[in-house]
Each structure stands twice: as structure tokens, then as C-alpha cells.
Image: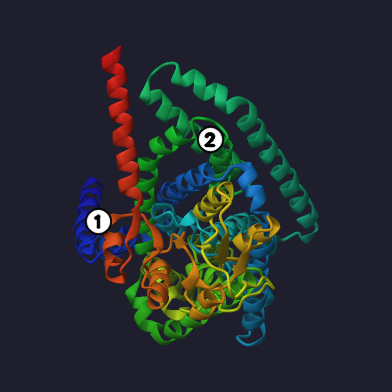
Amino acid sequence: MLGIIVWTIFIAVMVNLLLKRFNLPTIIGYIATGTIIAYLFDLHSAVNNHDLKEIAEFGIVFLMFTIGLEFSIDHLNKMKKEVLVTGGLQIVVTTVFVFLVCMYILGFDYKTSLVIGAALSLSSTAIVLKIYNESGDIKKPYGRRVLGILIMQDIGVIPILLMISIFSMDDSKSIANIIFETTVAAFILILLLYVTGKYLLEPFFEYVSESKSEELFVASVLLVAIGASHMAYYFGFSHSLGAFIAGMMISETKFKHQVEADLVPFRNLLLGVFFITVGMQINFSVIAEHIFTILILLPVLLGLKYIIIYLLVRIDDTKRVAFKTALSLVQIGEFSLAVLELARSKSLIDPTYSQILIVTIVISMLLTPLVLKNLSSIAARILPEDTMQIVNSMQIADDTKGHIVVIGYGHLGQEVVEKLKAEHRNYVIIEHNMKYYKIGKDKNEPIIFGNAASKTILQSINIKESAAIVVAIDNPEKLTLICEVIDDLTHNTKTIVKVGRKSEAKELERLHIEHIIVEDEVLSQAILEETRSCRLDFIKK
């Protein structure tokens, strides 16, 4: 056993070092490692080991716990539309559509059709949130959309498992009792976690921190994360749901950042184990035997989920946000594997169909890191003209001169506008995200909705006569595209741009931009000045 562990670590390190040369994410390396060791040591059956499954699942538990740390109860309350409406509709619509296809076209019975439909409605929490958490995309508009849908999917696992239990029961009269017991259990679980988080967590961590022992603090963090997940599991829910709620409780305390720092090493290690178990489920003999079925099934499933999610998000958001959200969630996730395995063990689905679906799901998960890594560039190429139209009636006078054009009304844009207001400067805002546009409208700001990469829109606000143009957006691809269009109109002589890194600034040099603010340089300079100030204060003392 120890030899297998050593070889697994060695293969994982070598494969990931190789993939890093091509700038590919480690998730692919872990999945490849799982496939290699499965064939090298004949471990295909080991993936069904209950203990290994539980250890691997704790990678998702710690991931959901750290995600919860970023989202307080108040934050989640603001996301209730993304969670309940968009997420709920996505599960229902996908399940119903697949159910109808399975039952009336493929000829499956209604139980099998419903189980397959529910399983395929789920996406990969582990892969998507890990990549989004590392890249910071989780805080962007489409990132919040993705998180909201994934949270609802995680909650949706509960009724799916309940449905399988009901389908496999002999006595149908107990259905009402099961539903009642589940509802009561949910109420008790939420009440216990809420009371514990609100009144006990902060005093507990304060008491532990007074011991000045890092080991005890780390042990306390593990106790809270694992304890909450076990409590959720005890009441019949998923481990990760309990961990997410516990993370939200801790996010309300001052220990949030230290807790996250202490938990990250455990999270990354166990997520590696989880992805290795995913790779162990790739069976080339099944792929070879059913290659044509898989080649047809894979794009059909991905296309179906893309269309459903895109249309649901597009109802009240931009094409670009809908595109990125849908493309991020087209894969089928790890909970789907668990649902199908449980359904197979309960004789609700044929083992052959189960194997075909599992291989298809794993391949969809394998493709996801490649898609997410290039998500922004794909969106920029496919949707270069996101939303061209101006949807409000605000007009700029033809003789308007000397005004400031603010492109983007996100957090930075709002700060810039507040400063301009304080100085009584004349300005106009362009925003293509409906959420931020509505915020601006509610504040009675001079804001128009449209794509700033459109010459028509830029000319409509007299950009050539403006005093300055502030590009306040975070998307590097979009920023470059906008600056290229502005360069055609004004040669960027009065454009002010904020970028995160010096490498991004170099990419803009060809566009004649004289005023580029590099965030890393500004922060490092501010830190240096503060350090000098502290040193002078120390010398004076």
C-alpha cells in the first residue's frame, strides 16, 4: 500500500511538472495520475472503496468551507435570486428535458429517466470553484452566478438522494414520513449551525487563540469544518453543505482570514486525492466498446446544459455573463457520479448505461479546466460585440466638451465617480453589465448601457471632445479591445487605465497609452512608504 502511495505522489509530481511547461492546470495532472495508477496497479475496483470515497470527498468539503468563508449570510441573502431562481430553474428544466428524452425517445422507464435527468443536471463544484477561487473570478459577476447555481445544485442533491430512496422502497406509504423527517432534520441542522456560529464560534476561537498555540488553532479549525460536515451528514445531507454553512458562520468573525490560511493546505491535498479518484474511473475498454455512443452523447449533453443555463442567465444579464456562466457549468459533476453509482446499486439503472454515463461525465470534467483557463479569451473572440445598443433614453448634447468618460461602473468605477462628484466634474458612464447599470440608474447617475468596444457608442458620448477617459474594468482581454477602439478615435492621448500587473501594462504599450496605473506597483510603493514611516517613528522613540 505504501509503495502505491509513493508511486502515486511521484507520478502526480512528474505529470504536473510536465503540464506546467504548457501552462495547464494541476487538476488535469491529478486526473491523469488517477488513470495511470488505475492501470499500473489494477485499481479500477478500488475507486468504489467506501473509505477512499469519504477521504476524497473531504477535498470538496474543505473547498466548500473556504468558499463559505468568502460569503457571509448577508452576502448570500443578496444572492438569493442566483441561488433559488436561476439555480432552481436550471435543475428543474434540465431534469425535465432529459427525463422526456429518456422516457419517450430512448424508451427507459420513468424511474430510470428521472434519476438520469437529475444526475445530469448537476455540474462540478470541485473543479469550477477551485479554478475560480484561485483566479479570483469567483468575485466577478459571472463568478457569482456560477456560485449561486452550484450552491443550489449542492442543495438539490438532497431531494435527488431522497428520490432514489423512495424509488427503491418496498412500502410506498412511508413516503410522507420520509419527506416530513427530512424537513424536520433540515430545520434542526440549520438552527444548530446558526446558533453555534452566531453565539459560540467567536468566543471559542478567542479562547483557543489565547493559548498562543498554532497547533491548537489548526486543530480547532479542522474540528469546526469536519464537525459541521459530519453534523450535516448525520441529518441526511451532504458533507459539503454543512461545511459551506460553517464557513459562512466563521466569515462573520474576525478569524476569517487566519482560518482560511490554515485550511488551504488540507483543502489542496484532499482535492488532489479527489481528482485522482476521478481519473481512476476512466476505463479505456468501456470507451473503446461504446466510443460512438460517447462521442454523440458528450456534445449533446454539453450543448443541452449550455443552452438551458445561457437562456436562464440571459433573462436579466448580458450576453457575456450568460455565455461565461453557461460555458463554466456545461460539464456534469462529481455528485452525478455518486448519484449514478447509488442508482446502479439499487437496480434503478442498467450497469452498462451507468458505465457509459460515468465515462462521459469524467471526460466532460477533464475538458473543464481547459475551457475555464481560456474562458475570457473565448468570450472575447465569440462575443466581440457583446451588447451594442443603448437601452436608456439619456442623450449627450452635441456640444458637450471637457467631460470625463468612465468606462465600467464596478467597484473601481464607483470610487472614481464619487471622487469626480466631490470635485463637481462633469462625467458620463458606460456600463455593459446590467447589474451595475441598474445600480447607476438607481443613483440617478449619467449612465448608458452598452459595449464600450463599439465605436458607435463611444462617438455617441462625444469621446473626442472629452477631457479624459478612465477605463475601470478588470477583464484584460476586454480592456485591450476597448483601448484599441479608443485608439482609433483619440489615439489614447487622454486615456487612463488601471492594470493589475506590469506584464499587462507592456501589452498596452503599442496603443500609445501614456497613463497606465499598475496596481502592484502602487501597492508596493505605498507599503514601502508606510515601512519608512514606521522606521522613522521607531528611531524617534
- Marks 1 and 2, the one that precedes in the sequence: 1
Q: Residue furthest top?
A: 541
Residue named by callout 1: 12
Q: In terms of secondary structure, where does tag 2 sit?
A: helix
366 to 8, vertically: above or below: below
The residue drawn where x is 25% and y is 49% is 5
Residue 486's image quarter? bottom left
The quarter of the rendered structure image containing the C terminus is top left
Residue 169's image quarter? bottom right
Q: Is residue 182 left or right of residue 407?
A: right
Q: Is residue 423 left or right of residue 48?
A: right
The percent position of residue 437, horizontal first and vertical second, equals: 62, 63
Disc number placed over residue 352 in the picture, else none: none
What separation in Å lies between label 1 and label 2 (alpha carbons)?
A: 30 Å
> Callout 1: 10 Å neighbours few (<14), some, many (20+)?
many
Residue named by callout 2: 227
56 to 504, vertically: above or below: above
What amino acid is at disc 2?
A: Gly
Query: Relative to the observer, which residue lies in front, 3 or 385?
Result: 385
250 to 33, vertically: above or below: above
Query: Relative to the observer, which residue lies in front, 316 or 32?
Result: 316
Q: In terms of secondary structure, where does tag 1 sit?
A: helix
The residue drawn where x is 59% and y is 61% is 149
The percent position of residue 170, horizontal first and vertical second, equals: 72, 61
What amino acid is at disc 1?
A: Ala
The percent position of residue 84, horizontal first and vertical second, equals: 68, 58
Q: Looking at the image, what colour scheme do you see?
A: rainbow
